[in-house]
Image (cartoon, rainbow, N blue to C red):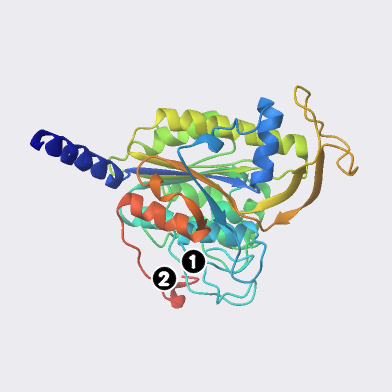
Amino acid sequence: MMRKIVVFLFVLSVSLQAAERQAKNVILFLGDAGGIPTLHAASLFGHQEPQKLFIQNMPHVALSDTTPANAWVSDSAAGMSAIVTGQKTNNGVISQSATAVRGKQDGEILQTILEHAEERGLSTGVVTNMSAADATPAACYAHSNDRAKWGEIFVQLLKPRFGDGPELVIGAGRKRILTETEELGVNIAAELPKKGYAFYDSPEAIRPEDERVVALMDSGDFAAAPVVERAIQILSRNPKGYFLMVEWDMHTNNIKRGLERVVEIDDVIRETARRVGDDTLVIFTADHSFDLRVRRGNKNQPLILEGVEDAKQPIRMENGHTGEQVLAAAQGPGAERVRGYIRNTDIFHIMMSAYGWADKPAVAAAAVGR
């Protein structure tokens, strides 16, 4: 009897230790417009069966509410700001509180998970196949009352509020970012090297020895796998750990391209989850859903992607954001907190808890625009 009790206590102790272990690293994969209907269609498109995506089979899953502070349907700015700050805000606003009025009034600065990591000496990075100054990546490193202010957003890389700023920023939008920053009197190509960044116009140009990198391309049509692998290699050099956000566009206004991108990044998430150690929390979620539906079709036949305007076709799409819950899926330390119905703001707290960090209050509004 005593032996059984000892064994039971040992197993219980091991289980509790495993449940409470902390993450050294967090990788957040964000599918822009990657709602559950889109994931389902992508599984049928890429694997000819439902629920064959890796993210649909991660060990911990939840349904995440995406509503912003001022509406029922979110844009990427409000959706991602909630995920990385733990507070709801208004559509169009980048990591400022809901007192912000888009384009007119600043709100309180909300410290992001990336900034918490920077404050503690971790390495950080953002990778996106959309503009590096657009809503999702911007919400990680910048604060603005208007997501459209790409120039004002991007120059915040040069004056980080916490730590020395992200070690790695890779994305599209090069022409507009350079134009808008130049209009502000900032020569990005000259200023980035002063902050220790190597500045490139393609991800292929990144060298293995680079420690701080900004790569801006005109197009987001680059392969995800080698870029994510290189990003992890660079960030992993820090013995304290890292935070990495990877956004991949899943909008299906071009249905075939959108579904191909879902399948592509799902393969990257599968391989990343396989390769990283058990000290890394890997999370996937979406900032909002999208109005795509599988209406018809037969098994053992390819999913027809043409004629979406015809109600008789298998795929129907009305080309807009929608407000239903999206998938949140995770593995690694702290992943067990991803379960049931959650809010997008909960994902921030899940990441903070995984690192073993306590939340801090928002920075005072006076800090905006420093």
Q: Mark 1 and mark 2: span between their CA atoms? A: 10 Å
**Quarter of the figure with the N terminus:** top left
**121 displayed left or right of 126:** left
Q: Secondary structure at mark 1?
A: loop
Residue 366 visible to an observer of this rendering: yes
Q: Position of residue 352 (x, y in %)?
A: 37, 55
Q: Residues within 10 Å of mark 2 (few under 14, many from 20)?
A: some
Quarter of the image holding residue 77?
bottom right
Residue 185 visible to an observer of this rendering: no
Q: Position of residue 35 (x, y in %)?
A: 64, 47
Which residue is at the far left?
Answer: 2
* Image position of 74 with respect to 198: above or below: below
Residue beneath disc 2:
362
**222 displayed left or right of 314:** left
Q: Secondary structure at mark 2?
A: loop
Q: Position of residue 295 (x, y in %)?
A: 80, 41
Label for residue 87?
1
* Image position of 36 with respect to 57: above or below: below
Nearer to the camera, 200 or 342: 342
Q: Amino acid at mark 2?
A: Ala
Q: Residues within 10 Å of mark 1 (few under 14, many from 20)?
A: many
Nearer to the camera, 192 or 358: 358
Nearer to the camera, 188 or 244: 244
Q: Do the residues under discs 1 and 2 have CB atoms within 8 angstroms?
A: yes
Residue at left offset 67%, top offset 48%: 175
* Image position of 277 with respect to 163: above or below: above
Q: Amino acid at mark 1?
A: Gln
Which callout, 1 or 2, points to the residue nearer the camera? 1
Q: Earlier in the sequence, mark 1 or mark 2?
A: 1
Label for residue 364?
none
